[in-house]
Image (cartoon, rainbow, N blue to C red):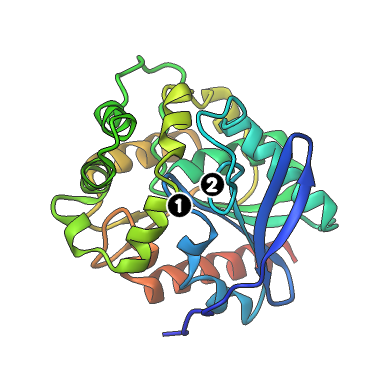
Amino acid sequence: MTRPTPDLPHDTLALPGGSLHYTQAGQGEPILLIHGSLCDYRYWRWQIPAFAATHHVLAPSLRGCWPDRQPHPQPGYRIAAHAQDLIQLARTLNVPDGVHVIGHSRGAQVAMAFATQAPDLCHTLVLADPAFRFDDEPETPPFYARTVDQLRAGDTEDALQEFIDTVNGPDTWRKMVGWFKDMTRDNAATLVSQILEANTPVRLRDAAALRCPLLLVGGSNSPAKYGTRQDRLQQLLPHARRARIALSAHGMNLANPRAFNRTVLEFIETARALSA
């Protein structure tokens, strides 16, 4: 396994009303990594060095996430706003041929928004365990409403345990390594903002209009709800490819990084060859 870089280089892009923090590595066609809830660019510690061997990797912390120190709730902590930040990052860094976009969990919805708002910049799209609802589905209470109540009451550890065990499986929090727990603690307050848009849907017509190569990735042991999202996307987009990462659940890029990295890079290479 490629060893993670212990101290990732840090860059900052000034944006209206704040900044976007990101790290980058490598050269070649750019890959944009978009993390999910309670995370930041450190989430991709096993992907950054592996992908940077052949590509230019861009891994941002979504605005409002560590090391952003602005208090929550933040009214600008929204899927569409995150996508606009990343579009600005791509345009600032001058990627005329587009980027390979990879989004995990909530980051998959940001990735969808990126591809919808700037299709010229999205060369390929990888959605890992997307969790969003579609606009023809009813709203449901967010599963982490109790988590947010616990956070507001100052019960951070129990709140994080409940959230992580819900999205990845029972007893996950207890087994998690220290760096991961520290990262989620650093980002715990983001859930107070996130719940303000918990039922924001993806429009069916936007999803059906995607034309870039699409890979849908799931963990072999991921909770069933993530698979239902991939099933619907594949119905809408028959050209989409599917992959399952063995010996993993929702955090498949951490549980089985070799398989995840290989799957993603093979997909990107195949798409590149077909477009040549």
The earlier-in-sequence mark between 1 and 2 is: 1
- Residue at left offset 64%, top offset 47%: 212
Q: Quadrant of residue 242?
A: bottom left
Please state the horizontal and vertical placement of residue 164, each as a whole percent of the image.
27, 48
Which quadrant of the structure image shows residue 206?
A: top right
The quadrant holding residue 117 is top right
At a point 37% along the width and 51% down the height, the residue shown is 185
Type of amino acid under label 2: Cys
> How many neighbours does mark 1 have within 10 angstroms: few (below 14), some (14-19), or many (20 or more)?
many
Give the residue number, with chain letter if any, for mark 1: 39
State the image coordinates of residue 263 (x, y, percent, origin top left): 45, 68
Task: Answer with left or right where residue 101 lies relative to residue 128.
Answer: right
Disc 1 vs disc 2: Cβ atoms closer than 8 Å? yes
Q: Is residue 78 visible?
A: yes
The three-letter amino acid code for the residue at tag 1 is Cys
- In front of the other: 188 or 51: 188
